[in-house]
Amino acid sequence: MVTGRDDSHHHIGGPTEKCGVVGVALGGRDAARPLYYSLYALQHRGQESAGIVTHDGFQQHSHVQMGLVGDAFDADDLDGLKGEAGIGHVRYPTAGDVSKSCAQPFAVSFKSGSLGLAHNGNLVNADELRDELENFGHAFTSTGDTEVIAHDLARNLLEEDLVRAVKRTMERIHGSYALTIMHDETVLGVRDPEGNRPLCIGKVDDGYVLASESAAIDTLDGELVRDVKPGELVVLDPDGSGFDSYQLVERDNTAHCFFEHIYFARPDSVMNDTLVYEVRRGLGRKLWEENGVDTDVVMPVPDSGRAFASGYAEAAQEDDATVEFAEGLMKNRYVGRTFIMPTQDERERAVRLKLNPIKSTVEGKSVTLIDDSIVRGTTSNQLVQLLYDAGATEVHMRIGAPPIIAPCYMGINMATREELIASDKSVEEVRDTIDADSLGYLSIDAVAEVLEKSRADLCLGCVTGEYPYDIDGEETDRDVSRPVVGAEAPLSD
């Protein structure tokens, strides 16, 4: 991960999410513009590349470009994307190279038609599948795992109908995935059996939408129908009149990514029937219950800590009405991903360019600073220092999530164990490193309680070091093993 690469609402050097996907089937108008608007709404999920694939009933049209959505398409590009059905993708690279070859949607033509695929997530067994498919004569053009899914599905479609082909592929791929797929002019959505990555269904006046987050559906003036269920295949009618649902794989437990609620999703998205903003406020209230500290001022790290801080401050004010909730750090919106900073010294300068304390809010006061995570600790350390420099008498740090002690293999670019400050340090040692007067994190049980899920139904790999998938060299938190493919696979009788 490149430190300092970030978008408008996350902080310097924080985790980066992998990808947003969308699929649209409309009756009577081209899908390109609605797809374009949806990708804009999902831009926070990936800023490396953007792409749209449509089908006009005769042929597939594709436009995929590096860069932000607004730069990747112009009016002519959209006019060239004919057809009332299509899929789209915004990407942040985690698996595969940062290059046009890994940009999505991935499009492929084969004997029984054309396929387009947009993928959010990360397969754990992509390499084994790729080796097997290469032995069958499939030629790969990219290093990403999306192409592996596309080839596997294409192969199955030669022998099976659409639903069975998808089911067969789902039985072979292991890992996290939310997919929007285009098979000729039919758009489908698939969510992995653990439901690790989000996907939802929306209705617009003249059709249906599949998207990583409901904010994309809002952008189209649509209404959220529901989340796609873990292990479910949703097939949109090409004329936009409805959709069919197939529950293809059942699991006893899900593995929803709790970090979607804490960090990645837009606050105005609804996931698991709950507004993300309200979840974050609830986590903030819990943070006060578990770890409250009496100070003069409560302030968020913008923008990532805002909802947590508002819940925390509200709970704190119920105990002590004199506590002030204030925006004490102002953000420069224009220090984006293009900011060049090769040296550590310049990185520290970047924090000053990006965030400026309001002196009158902090001078002579004790401050509680609230954020959603501490990854490497460098940014937290610099923020604490900024507040002391601005005259704060005490700086207490409170985090609306448990300590991140292990990497994510599920499609979030989080950093390696060596870079994760909490992986080998106690809370007290982290506090000492960031130089705060005190440090408190939210407990894992509190996260489960606010999300109204049992711990067994969440993916907690990054905070426990135990994963819901069979990953080489890592512990699992459930009875799970990856499918056997290729040379080791048993012959069917």
Image (cartoon, rainbow, N blue to C red):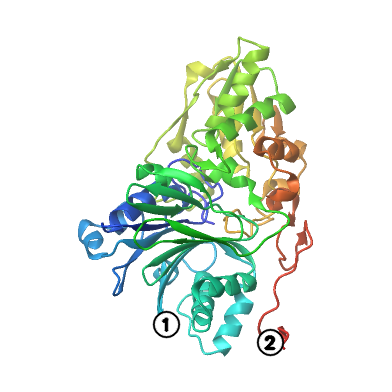
Residue 395 x %, y %:
63, 25
Observer-nearest residue: 14 or 198?
A: 198
The C terminus - image quarter: bottom right
- Please identify, in this view, whether the residue under mark 1 or under mark 2 is nearer the observer: 1
The residue sitting at the top extreme is 322
Q: Is residue 140 visible?
A: yes
Residue at x-position 54% and y-position 53%: 228
Image position of 35 with respect to 490: above or below: above
Q: Which residue is at the front of the view, 102 or 178?
A: 178
Q: How far from the left and from the top, in percent, is residue 225?
A: 48, 46
Image quadrant holding the N terminus, namely: bottom right
Kind of residue at disc 1: Ser
- Residue beneath the point at 65% across and 39% down: 451
Q: How many marks?
A: 2
Front-lying residue, 22 or 186: 186
Q: Which mark is residue 112?
A: 1
Q: Identify the residue at image location x=67%, y=30%.
A: 436
Task: Establish if 187 lies above or below 373.
Answer: below
Mark 2 lies on residue: 487
Task: Mark 1 or mark 2: name the one nearer the start of the chain.
Answer: 1
Label 1 SS:
loop
Secondary structure at badge 2 equals: helix
Name the quadrant containing residue 51.
bottom left
- Residue placed most toward the observer, 117 or 92: 117
On the image, the x and y values in percent for residue 283 come to 64, 32
Q: Position of residue 55 (x, y in %)?
A: 32, 68
